[in-house]
Amino acid sequence: MRKKIVAGNWKMNKTLTEAISLIDEIVTGLKDLVKNDDKLVIIAPPFPYLMKAAEMTKGLNQIEIAAQNCHSNEKGAFTGEISAAMILSTGAKFVIIGHSERRNYFKETDDFLAKKVEIALKTGLKPIFCCGELLSERQSGNQFDIVRNQLKNGVFNLSESEFSNVVIAYEPVWAIGTGVNASPEQAQEMHAFIRKIISENYSTQISENTTILYGGSCNAQNAAELFANPDVDGGLIGGASLIAKDFITIVNSY
Ligand code: PGA
């Protein structure tokens, strides 16, 4: 059966001291979770805190650490970049790939993202692969084509065994950081579509085992009704993951 996951994407927020106290509060607040086997919590702090975050959550097998990005090359002359192997060596197990902020602000293309997915998997990191349409694309009714193409170009060329290590996050761009979340019906409709195309590309069994997260203004107030949908397996949380109390409420909304 697929895992339920709540992942906190901190983006470019928190100093080291603030990061340590936030992780501390999250770990303390989630101590009962360790007994709940089918739930996983992922924390994605900025790169400089990965090792500290991994150390602070070591031994808690229901809390894992993720990086927010990685480079598509194994190593070499890429000043300022971070490789999948470096991330893995900090103790992190996941990496977010294809977030809309990377696609839009840093012009990361489908091809570049596919290479990142490949290197992440080859290295032993599990990708959390993001997809989602812009507001204009939804307004023109193209959301399904956009998401299908992002998945086709980013992850559908993987082998079955590679794909089984991928988590999908559906994040409509118009909902990210705007306070306007997708309605539970809109989220369920897209998640069911994603599950259907996974099953067409791989198999029903693989699609049933794939965790599909919702992201975009998911918060302590709306998480329960979003997560109540049969194809929504948790969330990728931005703003609300920076407040321990809210993040814990979201984790407990499932
Ligand atoms: P948000 O961000 O929860 O602040 O809307 C979600 C994300 O970008 O992953």
Image (cartoon, rainbow, N blue to C red):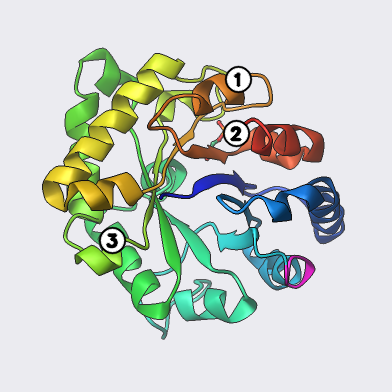
Residue on which the image places disc 1: 222
Identify the image quadrant of residue 37: bottom right
Q: Taking 205 as reference, is 236 left or right?
A: right
Callout 2 amino acid = Tyr
Callout 3 amino acid = Phe
Say whether disc 2 or disc 3 marks the residue closer to the N-terminus: 3
Horizontal and vertical percent position of residue 82? 51, 73
Range of the magenta residues? 55-59
114 or 54, which lies in front?
54
Q: Residue at x 62, y 75 (%)?
A: 91
Which label is found at residue 6?
none
**Residue 127 against residue 249 in the figure, above or below:** below
Mark 1 in CB contact with mark 3 (< 8 angstroms) = no
Could you tell me which secondary element the residue under label 3 belongs to? helix
Of marks 2 and 3, the one in the foreground: 2
Horizontal and vertical percent position of residue 199? 18, 45
